[in-house]
Amino acid sequence: MDSVELSTVVYVPPEEAYEFLLDFEGYARYSEYLDRVERHGEGEVGTEYDIHLQWWKLNYTVRSAVTDTDPPERIDWRIVEDLHAHGAWVVEDAPEASVDEAPNAANDDAETPDDAEAASRVRLVIQFDPNSASSDMLDLPALVSLGWVVDKVRPLVLKEAEKVVARIVEDLEGERREVNLTLHESPDEI
């Protein structure tokens, strides 16, 4: 299994970050490869989402499902078919990143909003098996192998995860700032 795990501090209470992350449909605003997201359910455990992806000459819809929630700390999900992948959004209170102590000592370049009163650490965890993808799941152009596609997509997963987290921070806090992302794990062979 390959893994991507990254985190950052966002200057809102954990409950606000958690509620924001439950809005899977809104994720289409964060990635150039994500066309739209359609929800099937009420947004809680068991809700499924059709995630419409576009990259290069490929269009693909992946279905994910919320498998567990632990408000305001965790949202677990998995891909329902075609690819073995699962992950979680994890939200933790981050009192060490309070306004009195910011910018974070680990990154002198990190900015703190002037009106920040609370802080949360938001972690995105993704585990996936790129070899579980079947060539039947995509309508590939002639002379293009699934292996080639997997090799090209693997580094995009990390790059897109970083963009998504940075854009979520901007929406949560209401303004753009330099975001300090901590990479805990990255895909093999990038």
Image (tube, rainbow, N blue to C red):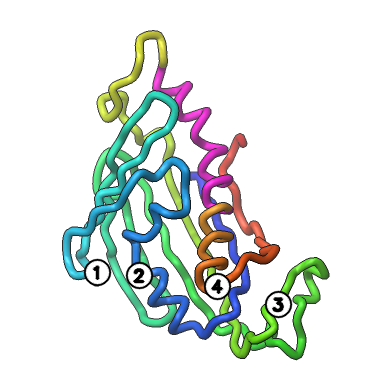
Disc ID at residue 112: 3
Callout 2: few (<14), some (14-19), or many (20+) C-alpha neighbours within 10 Å?
Answer: some
- x and y, in percent, of residue 182 in the image: 66, 62
- x and y, in percent, of residue 75 in the image: 37, 69
Q: Amino acid at mark 4?
A: Gly
SS assignment at label 1: loop
Q: Is residue 109 found left or right of 10 in the rendered image? A: right
Callout 1: few (<14), some (14-19), or many (20+) C-alpha neighbours within 10 Å?
Answer: some
Which residue lies most toward the front here? 175
Residue for badge 2: 22
Q: What secondary structure is the stretch in magenta mostly built from?
A: helix
Which residue lies most toward the top here? 143
How far is mark 2 from mark 3, CA to CA? 24 Å
Q: Which residues are magenta?
A: 145-162
Of the numbered discs 1 and 4, the one sitting upstream in the chain is: 1
Residue for badge 4: 174
